[in-house]
Amino acid sequence: MTEQIAELVSHHPLLAGLPGDVGDLVAGCARNVAFHAGDLLMSEGEAADTLFLLRRGNVAIEIQSAGRGVVVVGTVGPGNPVGFSWLFPPYRCCFDVRATEPVGAIAVDAACLRQKAEADPAFGYQLIKRVSAVILDRLQATRLRVLDLYGTPNP
């Protein structure tokens, strides 16, 4: 089973092509998980203890807004990672992440992954570079959605 997880991990776009035996390194922290449509993968304010590597299905990244209820700030699907709050103390989820359809993912234990990244600085640096690129892309996409929603001010 660990070999199967190692292969899935090593082929996920977040980790594919990293030098060394990344699949085996991360597989020790990982397990296959599945969610039904409507299930929460993570909840805002709860401990951020998992990085999800999506394999199939889509998820909505949501926030609760006073007066507006649930606001979807983004959606992501297969090949994408979800859940980055495990990188930053106090390790609390900043968003709800909800399956919008059946989802299959690799759940990576965050404490284990942090420990491996610290023990192998070359791996840790490459991981942080890749995660940071995803965070930047999502921030830019959110910026564009906000501009669409609120428009630009008139001069």
Image (cartoon, grey):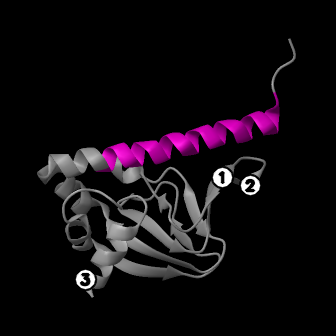
Would you say the magenta stretch is mainly helix, strand or loop?
A: helix
Q: Nearer the viewer, residue 62 or 141?
A: 141
The local secondary structure at tag 3 comes to: helix
In this rendering, position of residue 41 left or right of residue 72: left
* Percent of width and height locating residue 62: 63, 56
Q: Residue at 82%, 30% (x, y): give it.
A: 151
* Percent of width and height locating residue 1: 27, 88
Q: Nearer the viewer, residue 25 or 147?
A: 25
The local secondary structure at tag 2 comes to: strand
Q: In the current view of this chain or complex, which residue is farthest to the bottom? A: 1
The local secondary structure at tag 1 comes to: strand
Mark whose residue sits in front, 3 or 1: 3
In this rendering, position of residue 40 left or right of residue 48: right
Name the kind of residue labelled 1 in the image.
Answer: Gln
Q: Nearer the viewer, residue 77 or 15?
A: 15
When the figure is inspected, residue 95 is found, relative to residue 146, above or below; the finding is below
Disc ID at residue 3: 3
Nearest to N terminus: mark 2 or mark 1: 1
Q: Write the start and end of the magenta stretch as one range.
A: 127-151
Nearest to N terminus: mark 3 or mark 1: 3
Report if the CB atoms under discs 3 and 1 are less than 8 Å apart.
Answer: no
Disc ID at residue 69: 2
Separation (CA) of disc 3 from disc 1: 39 Å
Q: Residue at 23%, 49% (x, y): give it.
A: 124
Name the kind of residue labelled 3 in the image.
Answer: Glu
Name the kind of residue labelled 2 in the image.
Answer: Gly
Mark whose residue sits in front, 2 or 3: 3
Disc ID at residue 64: 1
